[in-house]
Image (spheres, rainbow, N blue to C red):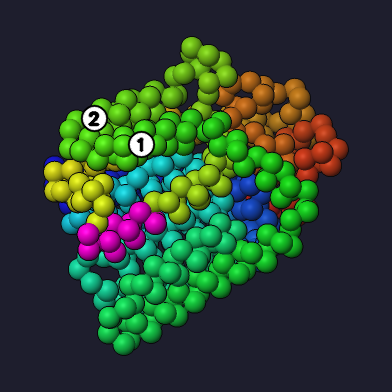
Amino acid sequence: MPPPALQRLVVLLLWSLSAWSAFNSRALFWDGSAFLANILELGQVHDFYTARAHVDWVTQAPVLALAQLGVRDTWLLSMVYSATLFGLPTALYHLALARVRDDGLLLAIVVAVVATVYLPTSFFIVGEYNVAFAAATAAVATSLRPSGRPLGDALLALILGLLCVRSYEAMVYLGPLVAAILLWSARGAAPPVRLLLTIAALAFAAAAIVAGVTIVDYWDHPHFVKVRSMTLDFWQNLQFAIPVVGLVLCGLGALLRPAWLQGSGPLVVVGIAAAALALTPWYRLLHEHSILYPPSHYLARQAAGGLLAVLLGSLWIAVAWRDRPPRLLAVLRLPTVSRRAALAMTMLLVAAAVPDLVLTGLWSDYLGRMRALVDTREGAIRAADLPLLDWPDKLFAQDWSLPAMSALVSRTPGRAYVLVDKDYRSNPPFDPACGTLPRLEAYGWKK
């Protein structure tokens, strides 16, 4: 299958997953329910964390606009919020894929980003890193496109740079990398394009500064201390760890013997990894602790950011190193090898869609049970009396966001709340406003 056909397949799969996730209101997972409840309750953007404010403004504006226009159906509003959170990174990855579709090697790298960085960490879609990672990928792909750097792409890079100024702490290392790539790609471009790319590079550099200052300011904050302590826990995310192992094995084989890439070895390795990834939803039948765990998407985001930096650097090297390239790069550029690489990464992406769909189905069932609960009870509902820690509800329950969740999915918000017996000090919400009991007067889940 030629690279353009693979690109169309990947794009179709991406948008299909995005639409299905939006229909099932996946934005309500964990922090998302508290964020949406605050947006509706206070009638303003929930941008308490200024270092990520630009992403919040963009992703929360549609649902806030609908609420101000009088929409009170929380089912519709939750779908719109989900559609925005999933649609923006999907659109950016679509753009990146479109820009590299005629080059098998570049397409393989961008598909690898989607399969190993985006899907394994996107159940926690409310995390601003989803947009930041996609924006960095789109900026690099558009600036390195084989067919040149038109003015429109340069303007887009500038817009993405401004978006990323306040996006996520990972920009402390992604920002300088993207800025360097933009400055390199500006060489020899027409003056207007060169000017826009230079300003875009400055924006990504500014994003690195904002991220760095934020890290310093919050270094001793209890929440960030806890986050740092979990950096190496990415292995708990099977959806991330399995494809990464496959990539590492292929990389080691290619480094030790570049000619290995010309055989069927890489397809075999990736095929085994893809099969192992597709089967992850059923590992718990063999071992009860070998489960797909949506909160582990949050745990793997830092490792995913590091992997993204490696893959974006690989994109740059693949385009820039034309004179006397090393044997490995020369082999990778062979048409048959690059097409096989694109096919292998597409196989990995298709496999990654399987656990994503399974988790979305379990999530939809969980929402249904929560709706039935709050619509048939009154007052405080003790979580201790519910099977929230049993399979599969334990995959989705978060203690301090349960009140917001129970209010959003209720036909009459404020009639019943699900509460956890805790002091709210051992695991407090990072924003005090997220721990309240939203009333959401005049709102209701109309499904």
Residue 322 sits inside the magenta stretch: yes
Q: Residue at left 26%, top 47%?
A: 328
The reply to whether residue 37 is in sight is yes
Which region shows up in magenta? 312-324
| SS at mark 1 in the image | helix
**The disc label shown at residue 252, or none:** 1
**The disc label shown at residue 39, or none:** none
Q: Look at label 1 and name its amino acid.
A: Leu
The N terminus sits in image quarter: top left
Residue 383 placement (x, y as % from top left):
74, 28
**The disc label shown at residue 265, or none:** 2
Residue 94 placement (x, y as % from top left):
32, 56
In-front residue for pair 150/19: 150
The quadrant holding residue 337 is top left
Residue 162 placement (x, y as % from top left):
50, 73
Instruction: Name the side, left or right, on which 13 lies relative to 28.
Output: left
Instruction: Name the side, left or right, on which 421 lies relative to 405.
Output: right
Q: Residue at left 53%, top 24%?
A: 291
Q: Look at label 2 and name its amino acid.
A: Gly
Above or below for 128 versus 123: below
Q: Residue at left 30%, top 43%?
A: 13
Main SS of the magenta segment? Answer: helix
Residue 445 placement (x, y as % from top left):
57, 45
Instruction: Name the side, left or right, on which 288 lies relative to 34.
Output: left
* Residue sitting at the far top: 286
The number of callouts visible is 2
Q: Residue at left 55%, top 37%?
A: 234
Residue 351 sits inside the magenta stretch: no
| SS at mark 2 in the image | helix
Q: Earlier in the sequence, mark 2 or mark 1?
A: 1
